[in-house]
Image (cartoon, rainbow, N blue to C red):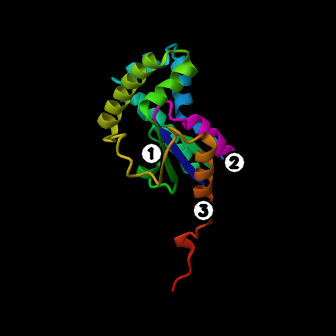
Amino acid sequence: MLVTLSGLPGSGTSTVARLVAAALGLDHLDGGTVFRTVAAEQGMSLAEYAKLAEHDENIDRALDDRLTERARQGDVLLESRLSGWLATRAGLEALTVWIACDEVERARRVGGRDGHDAEEALAHNQKRERSERARYLGYYDIDLTDLSIYELVLDSTEAGPEALVAEIVAAARARADRPDPAEAPAP
């Protein structure tokens, strides 16, 4: 089973991803954590490494190749901004999920998590999202506002993690119970 979970900073993807992976018995690979780890290994902050990635597409491509390779192995919940796109473009059978959330609420969450006020967090989120959107459009021709590839688009603005997890787990289990058309007997 492959589940992809995507959303903008503060939408709740990390919380929901951990809970869904545990409920389904899947490994959880978080692209943001991998990106932060590589930044730290390079002696850079997340912001510095993201700035470098704006001018060196090899940074994003190496991360995305790593995530796609793990997705091909299956039995994983892949969490990253592009995970749904990566699985779709690789032709992988996956439950693709996008978690949306009001930008003010996302900023409140990010500010609380990172120790910033909401206004500062909002400005930081907007700058980060502009950077990522430009990179993904330029490197991959992917527009993050295009949600057409997602099987589920959920909103966490008011819905708590438990409700989102329940919906995703139910969809994943329903998908797993569907017969594989490739294994159907010939008429």
Categorize mark 2 by other alpha carbons within 10 Å: few (<14), some (14-19), many (20+).
few
Calculate the distance from the C-alpha at mark 1 to the C-alpha at mark 2: 23 Å
Residue at 58% across, 52% down: 167
Q: Amino acid at mark 1?
A: Leu
Calculate the distance from the C-alpha at mark 3 to the C-alpha at mark 2: 14 Å
List the residue tagged with mark 2.
23
Front label number (1 vs 2):
2
Q: Is residue 14 magenta?
A: yes
- Residue 138, position as x, y percentages in the image: 29, 34
Q: Earlier in the sequence, mark 3 or mark 2?
A: 2
Residue 25 at least partly seen: no
Which numbered dot is residue 174?
3
Residue sitting nearer the eye, 41 or 103: 103
- Residue 19, position as x, y percentages in the image: 66, 42
Label 3 residue SS: helix
Residue sitting nearer the eye, 165 or 184: 165
Label 1 residue SS: helix
Residue sitting nearer the eye, 86 or 169: 169
Which numbered dot is residue 150?
none
List the residue tagged with mark 1.
86
Residue at 48% across, 30% down: 105
- Residue 33, position as x, y percentages in the image: 56, 29
Q: Amino acid at mark 3?
A: Ala
- Residue 126, position as x, y percentages in the image: 38, 25
Boundaries of the magenta span = 8-22
Front label number (3 vs 1):
3
Relative to 48, say whether 171 is above or below: below
Q: Is residue 167 magenta?
A: no
Q: Amino acid at mark 2?
A: Ala
